[in-house]
Amino acid sequence: MTTTDKIDIRHEGMRIGGEIVFTDDVVEVKYPYTDEVIGTVPAGKAEHAAKAFEIAANYKPKLSRYERSQILQRAGELIGERREYLAKWLTLELGICHQHAIYETKRAQDVYQFAASQAMNDDGEIFSCDLTHNGKERKIYTTREPVKAISAITPFNHPLNMVSHKIAPSIATNNCMVCKPTELTPLTAIALADILYEAGLPPEMFQIVTGMPQDIGDEMITNENIDIITFTGGVPVGKIIASKAGYKRQALELGGNDPLIVCNDLTDADLEKAATIAVAGATGNSGQRCTAIKRILVQESVAEKFVPMVLAKAKKIKFGDPQDPETELGCVIHAQAAELFENRVYMAEKQGAKILYHPERRGALLPPIVVDHVPHDSELVMEETFGPIIPIVRVPDNDEEVMAISNSTDFGLSSGVCTNDLNRAIAYINGLDVGTCNIWEQPGYRIEMSPFGGIKDSGNGVKEGVIEAMKFFTNVKTYSLPWP
Ligand code: NAD
């Protein structure tokens, strides 16, 4: 029996102004594990995006803070109630295993819970005006106002959570958003839109258009009704957006190749702990997190002890059928991606790396390949290798040199450091050119409310996370009143 015998293939429409809109041409969505078509979405064109932005710009939301908070709260609850359904479709369109899909639904739930509570906070400020040489008996007040329309363009790797990080702060600030999810995993975004409407969101405040970037991408960047573009995706597309967006405000959350740095002051028990973090961080979400561990930088004097620990943990991972609840590692997005990453491993091997574990790849099912002695400047670790590879780079015992190696790539998203020496921890926090540094944690560790985002090629320094995004999505208006 094939997968499609067991599911109802979803033929979805766009969500534009409360209507479900279909087109003659469709984009097929495939299950990476079997390559079967599991759904279709419309191959929308620029005119569809233009229509959605017109609706968004002409709609002026009047939801009270209480109403916004209630909608967000209810949306989070509905995600909880529909967890199994959402996880099933996350697995089907993305190929990650069921366990990782469940994890994503819980993260998304948190986003709505935080946004619901933030919507209740008054974010205005008050300034007394009798503080200055030429002061007066007045007060200046600030209030935050929504913009005309927000364009959200999202990546394939977190089909639920990335869209949630855009739409929840948008609702919390009474904004109208048009989202174009990726053509690779668009079905979850559509399911999410329906959950939000069910929770009480006016459909003008969140619309979904779908299609191929060459047909609809430019309109998502240049439409005159867009005040803000919030983009999460790869560096090349981020730079295209930056070049076309002109005066529009942009959040560009781009790729990474985050290190986990394992220092030489660790005991055997600590090295075990570090190895657990390393393997989980490299393989979670099939290694398709912008903050996945892409390079394990271990200091020479502890490497001989540390590497076998990593190898043993990688060998224990049960990889295979993504829908089997016991599976701990599923597929990457498609076979071509898996092949590219595997080839980078072979290229590193030619440059001196040693492959310690590589059970067979089957199509998009890429195993947790463990590679040791990876040259720090090999393509495998200089580029973003977006899969569950576990590359170990042996680095000098001198921390300055480790930081220089860590900083030598174009990326600067996040990092993790395992040391018990507070002075060394502080030196790494100060010395790494990244947006985040987690001591004794995966680079990807965050809560959905804390500021998050990278520097260098990983992003333009604008942070996400519910609180930062709410600020970014609003304009501050100041007004003053003639009373002290
Ligand atoms: P991608 O850049 O290929 O695509 C992202 C989105 O851009 C998709 O919706 C795609 O359709 C759209 N797009 C493509 N070309 C376009 C164009 N010319 N104009 C307008 N839109 C266009 O990224 P991806 O492969 O889907 O996602 C993986 C990448 O996202 C990785 O690099 C990952 O690190 C990054 N990412 C970053 C973060 C972060 O917070 N920094 C989070 C998740 C993923």
Image (cartoon, grey):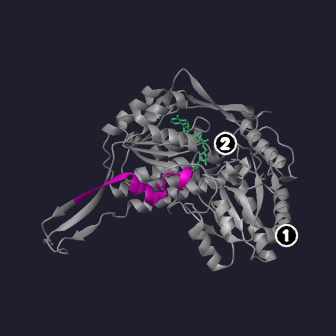
Question: Which one is in front, 64 or 289?
Answer: 289
Q: Which mark is residue 94?
A: 2
Report the side of 56 relative to 309 (left or right): left
What residue sits 35% from the left and 37% below the top? Answer: 225
Residue 131 sits in which quadrant?
bottom left
What residue sits 73% from the left and 62% below the top? Answer: 297
Q: Which residue is mark 1?
A: 305
Q: Which segment is the magenta one? A: 453-478
Disc 2 is placed on an element classified as: helix
What residue sits 60% from the left and 51% below the top? Answer: 410
- Which quadrant: the N terminus? top right
Circle 2 Cα neighbour tier, 10 Å, few/some/many (<14 / 14–19 / ≥20): many
- Which quadrant: the C terminus? bottom left
Question: Which one is in front, 173 or 157?
Answer: 157
Earlier in the chain: of badge 2 and badge 1, it is 2
Which residue type carries mark 2? Leu
Residue 148 in sight in this render? yes
Circle 1 Cα neighbour tier, 10 Å, few/some/many (<14 / 14–19 / ≥20): few
Which residue type carries mark 1? Lys
Ligand 1 rendered quadrant: top right
Q: Is residue 471 magenta?
A: yes
Question: x%, y% of residue 456?
Answer: 54, 53
Q: Nearer the viewer, mark 2 or mark 1?
A: 1
